[in-house]
Image (tube, rainbow, N blue to C red):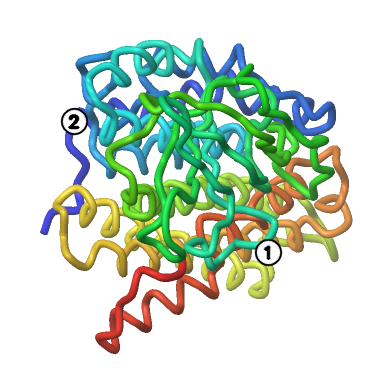
Amino acid sequence: MDFTLSEEQVLIQDMARQFAADKLRPNAAQWDEEKHFPVAVMREAAALGFAGIYVAEEFGGSALSRLDAALIFEQLSMGCVATAAYLSIHNMASWMIDSYGDAMQRAKYLPQLMSMDLIASYCLTEPGSGSDAAALRTKAVRDGDHYVLNGTKAFISGAGVSDIYVVMVRTGEAGPKGISTLVVEKGTPGLSFGANERKMGWNAQPTAEVVFEDCKVPVQNLLSDEGMGFKIAMSGLDGGRVNIGSCSLGGAAEALALAKEYIQTRSQFGKPIGAFQASQFKIADMATELEASRMMLYRAAAAIDAADPQKGKYAAMAKRFATDMGFKIANDALQLHGGYGYLKDYPLERIVRDLRVHQILEGTNEIMRVIIARHELGQNQDRKL
């Protein structure tokens, strides 16, 4: 067991840290305030290989490991949680096309996805099926050399801006065996989008419904075979959970750094508030929770890389713990700032708002407990996320 990063991993980590410092942190507050989706900056990230971190090199991917991805998303999130989280979604959708697409699909989409000339979204959740993903109702009926789609997807990051939508649809029977995956291109007749949701956080990326009304999609856009959609969705979510946990880790690390700096410069009762044991104990707990989260995430990422049979459990454990602790650390950092932490002049309130949703998406933390319990009790089922 070696906890030391390789020389290459240190270089990757440093590159992501520098990009966050130069391109993300200076702009994050403005992007949040203006609800600006920084596509141009994300394309700069893509030029560094951050759009296809674990996509094969054949079409421009970086072919790195899941652990490498965790290192990258942690560093990027120290600059802007919302932007890093969107990059993780784009990576997941691109990986699905790379892993399950045929040669024609991979050649058609991946080169432009790797440069982010094409931006990708992932469409699983529906108004009536969140945690119970296998109950999704968006239907795709075969009609000659097309599928005709009808239904609605909810809470889709990038909706209306993204060029490519990796969509889970029902092509067969009820339950997981009747689900398939289609790639739907923006501009397809019958594809439309709801209004941008007014959200607590993640304002630097759009979120809206994706609506299909007699939307005709070529059969050649089917990823893998009919009935494989639920397997594709679940295989993507293990990595997605580690990615979003890593985004929580980065946001929490930034919050902790800000809190340590603040309590050493803010004075009350004649001395820095960092001289009080109450502040010191809070910092100690925050640092411990951060390091525990980091170790769990790295362990889960390594398990995915090794195709460990327990990878789903490790990913659920890491996601649950890191996103809960990430939010707690950021909230504690805000508390240490007192009233100033509540002001938009300081970054803490934005970090808190951005991290809160991580306890909900990629499977709620309650569902993470269901997954963990099933593994522990020998009752593992792939029914719910």
Which element is circle 2 on?
A: helix
Q: Residue at the location (27% across, 16% down)? A: 104
Q: Residue at the location (11% across, 59% down)? A: 1
| Residue sitting nearer the eye, 92 or 165 | 165
Residue 365: x percent and y percent? 53, 69
> Taking the image as drawn, is residue 232 in sight?
yes
Residue 384: x percent and y percent? 46, 69
Where residue 332 is drawn, which disc sits there?
1
Q: Residue at the location (40% across, 46% down)? A: 180
Where residue 7 is drawn, which disc sits there?
2
Q: Which amino acid does the dot numbered 1 rest on?
A: Asp
Residue 119: x percent and y percent? 53, 21
Q: Which amino acid does the dot numbered 2 rest on?
A: Glu
- Sequence order check, earlier mark of 1 and 2: 2
| Residue sitting nearer the eye, 235 or 37 | 235
Q: Are marks 1 and 2 in contact (CB under 8 Å)?
A: no
Marks 1/2: CA distance? 34 Å
Q: Residue furthest bottom?
A: 377
Position of 21 compared to 201: left or right?
Answer: left
Which image quadrant for residue 27? top right
